[in-house]
């Protein structure tokens, strides 16, 4: 099973923060969106300063880490996401 290593990057400080391992990219994005939309978080107060990045992928069976760094999402974009189908009708 593979998992991803992600973290929040502070662009103003040029510093890596909060390195975590998650099952997949969608889980990491969902958690990042929640943090970004929390009015009490520093990220919500300064969304232009933060982004979510992928530091690598862990292959749990082989014990290998692929450390390809990829930008996933800007905090300002996470705050602006609205889903068209929030109200589901049958």
Image: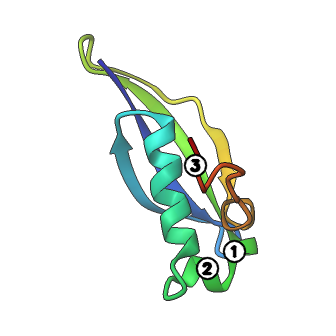
Indicate the secondary structure of the residue bearing disc 3.
Answer: loop
Based on the displayed image, in which of its 4 quarters is residue 69 positioned? Answer: top right
Number of other residues with Cα within 10 Å of mark 3, as a class: few under 14, some 14 to 19, many 20 or more: few
From the image, tell me which residue sits under label 2.
44
Question: In the shown orientation, is residue 71 left or right of residue 57?
Answer: right
Q: Distance between the residues labelled 3 and 1?
A: 29 Å
User: Residue 88's mark?
Assistant: 3
**Contact? badges 1 and 2 (CB < 8 Å):** yes
Q: How far apart are marks 2 and 3 (CA)?
A: 28 Å
From the image, tell me which residue sits under label 1.
47
Based on the displayed image, in which of its 4 quarters is residue 80 positioned? Answer: bottom right
Q: Earlier in the sequence, mark 3 or mark 1?
A: 1
The spot of residue 11 in percent (x, y) is 70, 68
Whether 2 is drawn above or below 6: the answer is above
Question: In the shown orientation, is residue 45 left or right of residue 60?
Answer: right
Q: How far apart are marks 1 and 2 (CA)?
A: 5 Å
**Contact? badges 2 and 3 (CB < 8 Å):** no
Number of other residues with Cα within 10 Å of mark 2, as a class: few under 14, some 14 to 19, many 20 or more: many
Residue positioned 57% across, 49% down in the render: 88
37 and 43: which one is in front?
A: 37
Residue positioned 70% across, 59% down in the render: 82
Q: Quadrant of the C terminus?
A: top right
Q: Which of marks 2 and 3 is nearer the N terminus?
A: 2
């Amino acid at each position: 099973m593979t998992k991803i290593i992600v973290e929040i990057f502070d662009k103003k400080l040029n510093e890596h923060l909060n390195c975590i391992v998650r099952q997949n990219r969608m889980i990491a994005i969902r958690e990042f969106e929640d943090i970004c939309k929390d009015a009490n978080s520093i990220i919500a107060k300064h969304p232009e300063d933060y982004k979510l990045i992928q530091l690598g992928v862990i292959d749990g069976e082989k014990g290998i880490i692929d450390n390809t760094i990829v930008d996933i999402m800007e905090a300002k974009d996470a705050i602006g996401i609205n889903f068209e189908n929030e109200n589901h009708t049958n």
